[in-house]
Image (tube, rainbow, N blue to C red):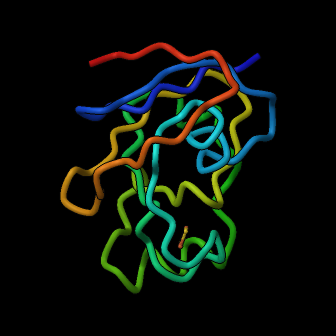
């Protein structure tokens, strides 16, 4: 199963099923990735910066690219967590500036605290 690592001061890492979105992976691993629009590709609060394994993410579709372009996030390392699907190991950095402190959510998936 693909390993997803979220680099952040509260970061997590763990394995998820193939084709899981980064947002769903975050939920499964107990990392609170912002998603103000509910995963509808209209807010960019779920944006991550791919550090490695970008080739293991699904291709950017028109909707995702259009939103990233409108927010001047056209560099290829920017991805929307709600749109990018995991197909292999990937490491992403979560910008601290758009991130809110996590609530105490219980995770059922096994994850590793990487602080
Ligand atoms: S949750 Fe809004 S764009 Fe991903």
Residue 16, position as x, y percentages in the image: 72, 26
- Quadrant where the C terminus sits is top left
Instruction: Pick the residue in front: 102 or 35.
Output: 102
- Specify the quadrant of the image occupied by residue 15: top right
Residue under the point 65% across and 35% down = 28
Give the percent coordinates (x, y) of residue 33: 46, 51
Location of residue 70 with respect to 60 vertically, above or below: below
Residue beneath the point at 27% across and 63% down: 98
Residue that extends furthest to the left in the rendered view of this protein: 97
- Figure quarter occupied by ligand 1: bottom right
Q: Quadrant of residue 90?
A: top right
Work out whether 84 lies above or below 109.
Answer: below
Quarter in which the N terminus is drawn: top right
Res 6 quadrant in image = top left
Describe residue 18's horizontal placement relative to residue 61 as left or right: right
The spot of residue 13 in percent (x, y) is: 49, 21
Q: Answer with left or right where residue 96 lies relative to residue 105.
A: left
Please tell me which residue is depicted at 60% across the width and 45% down the height of the picture.
22
Residue 23: percent from left, percent from top: 60, 50
């Amino acid at each position: 199963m693909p390993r997803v690592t979220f680099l952040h001061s509260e970061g997590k890492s763990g394995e998820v099923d193939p084709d899981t979105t980064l947002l769903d992976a975050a939920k499964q691993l107990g990392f609170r990735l912002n998603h103000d629009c509910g995963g509808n590709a209209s807010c960019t609060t779920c944006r991550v910066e791919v550090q490695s394994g970008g080739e293991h993410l699904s291709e950017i579709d028109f909707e995702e690219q259009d939103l990233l372009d409108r927010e001047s996030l056209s560099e290829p390392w920017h991805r929307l967590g709600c749109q990018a699907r995991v197909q292999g190991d990937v490491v992403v950095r979560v910008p601290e500036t758009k991130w809110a402190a996590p609530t105490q959510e219980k995770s059922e998936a096994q994850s590793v605290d990487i602080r």
